[in-house]
Amino acid sequence: MEVLRHFSHEHPLIFNEERSHKSEVYCSACGELVLDPRFSCMDCGFHLDKNCAEAPDVMNHPFHRKHNLELKASSPYDEGSPLCGFCNNICWNFLYHCSCNFDFHIKCAFLSYKVLKNDFRELQHLVPIISSEGHSRELEKAQCFSCQKSLLDSVYISPDYGFHLHKKCLELPLEINHPCHRYHSLFLQFNSDHLPCQICQETQHEGLVYCCSICKFVLHTGCVSPPPIIEDPSTHEHPFTRCLKNLSFNCDACGTLGNYVSYNCLTCSLMVHKKCITLPRFIKSIWHDHPISHNYFVVDNECTTHDCGFCHEDVNMESGSYYCSKCKFIIHVNCALQDARWYYKIESKDTVNAMSAVGALDPSFFVTKMTKIGEEIINAEIKHFSHQHNLVLTDEVKDRMYCDGCSQLILTSFYGCLECDFFLHKYCAKLPKKKQVISLYHQDPLTLIPHCIFKCALCRFMRSGFAYKCEVYMCNDLICVRCAEIHLPYKSQGHKHPIHFYPQLNGLSCNACGGSTDGVSIYGCKTCSFAVHYQCILAPQIAWHKWDKHFLTLRYHEDNDYSKYHYCDICEEKRSPNTWFYHCAICDNSAHLHCVLGDYPFIKRGRTFITNDHQHTLISVQKAHHPKCCKCGEPCFDLALECLEEECKYITHWRCNSNYKILWKDSKNLV
């Protein structure tokens, strides 16, 4: 009777050649059903199949040549579960472990070792070659374990171990010499350091690559013998020829450094990466309103800035970039294509021209009457899609008139309705009915809709008036017209340089309100330590507060050095002379931004509503005195809804109403 003392079990294991017919037995090392002879502990129900029982304690695996692998009976980690480098599944049982945190299932270690050392003969005898013709739908998603490519382009084998291999990948040599790396041999192994291929510049995280671990040099198996000539008329009119030599160059397509392999267009004197040959000629990017085109160099005497529209670093005009000649917008190739959600390819220039005309082909109004003296329009009447009556151009601005498009004060000539209190800034009247909003993942133009009460998906302010709505995707995002019209770079009166949008820029204080910028999106200047919260940049230039009969003007720093002036005349708290504030020059009053604007600066006062909570019509008001809210009992300091019936004393905070129960009386739109 053969007895085995195994490190993984406290009792001796007895060799048993007979298969049990009473119950199924599973190997404690690999978790598989034991069909062959096994070693067992009858007292504990512990079993090892013969292969696992005889597994070496230390393995020198060709797929991981850095270190030896040690056999472990359980996870070597205090936290988390180990993942197998071969099949990418959790190692629940025995595993081979490396000190650099590289792990194999015991069975995967045997299988991959067998694949290498036996030249795949055993696998080919055990598993037949399968043709990809007449493939099933499931096969369309299946990949070859080695090259990570689809199985549909070659015959393959599919062993009963949860992986597939192309026949051509099955026959790859374990060691090669390559002209791109003449110092050492390259070995077929895992890309455990996640290095990019030196030919295509892409990183293959799983599967097998040819690697020199000494020099950190990696080639994908499919890039070992790249095509000598690549021709793609949709991206470039001439063919590119391969130069397979260790040579540094600056890619003319993307402007970044290249090594080892370049593809050259002798006609145009271009040297490019292999991956840059197929760059799309036209794309629509979320970082710009219009389609942008790829150029190998940009000649524009009017281009005053070469800053990338995304990273705000300098773009070399003599190298490849994406460019809009209409707006002088330029962006690095790698910035534009960094995320697949940020752009899509446009197939033809005709499509580009059609997209540029969106908005012009669908105006939001048409002129019914116009009177001009010379070039000056002195009288105009329009029919706007948002209102049932015609609107007349007038410059008779009354106190505290608010635009029904953006809900901001009207200070100059505007379009108004002679039959009802409906007003639009001239700018808001001309807003396009279709618009692409920059920085949104929505790649289709948004649609302008009127009469909304909503929270803007970008600035997060509650808003009334016009909104741009996504009607293609099922997201129901609404964007306020101010956010939709912000262009990059942004020019603020509060700073001398153009300022750029940063999704996150930590370690600064907001120049507008003084708050931290950590973890939030901001507008900033790369030349100065200037940063403003996204919400603060939207503060209106002119505002009104119930405690001052005059308009207040936004100021960006305090000119008065006397500290007694550095107080807010609303909350009577101290304010910083270096942050923005509102000021009344007539009354010499100054106040914090939030003290003037409140929580709802972009909801139009004087608009009527109905709610499910009250039987009468309500009106939005900013009360000079502070009646108590009928719902919460607290004084109404900010925006409130008040009943229009004189005998009814009903009034509530805006925040005490459910937004989704409010109906704009003049509209059928729920918000």
Image (cartoon, grey):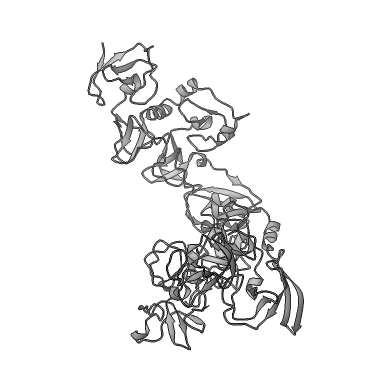
Q: On screen, 362 above or below 144?
A: below
Whether residue 308 sits left or right of residue 531 in the image: it is right
The residue most toward the front is 647
User: Which quadrant would the N terminus be assigned to in this image?
Assistant: top left
| Most foreground residue, 67 or 257 | 67
> Height in image: 574 above or below 145?
below
Whole-percent x and y of residue 81?
35, 38
502, above or below 171, in the image: below
Q: Nearer the viewer, residue 329 or 519?
A: 519
Q: Is residue 170 left or right of residue 432?
A: left
Position in image of residue 594 (x %, y %): 44, 73
The reply to whether residue 381 is visible in this rendering is: yes
* Residue 65 seen in the figure: no
> Viewed as shown, does residue 167 lie left or right of 595?
right
Query: Please, is residue 141 above or below residue 396 in the view?
Result: above
Q: Nearer the viewer, residue 170 or 50?
A: 50
Q: Is residue 609 left or right of residue 191?
A: right
Please give the name of the residue rendered at 67% of the width and 76% of the height, measured from the top-left corner: 415
Find residue 630 and report its horizontal and vertical position in percent. 47, 66
Residue visible at 50% across and 33% down in the picture: 169
Image quadrant where residue 608 sits: bottom right
Residue most extreme to the bottom: 586
Q: Position of residue 507 (x, y in %)?
A: 36, 66
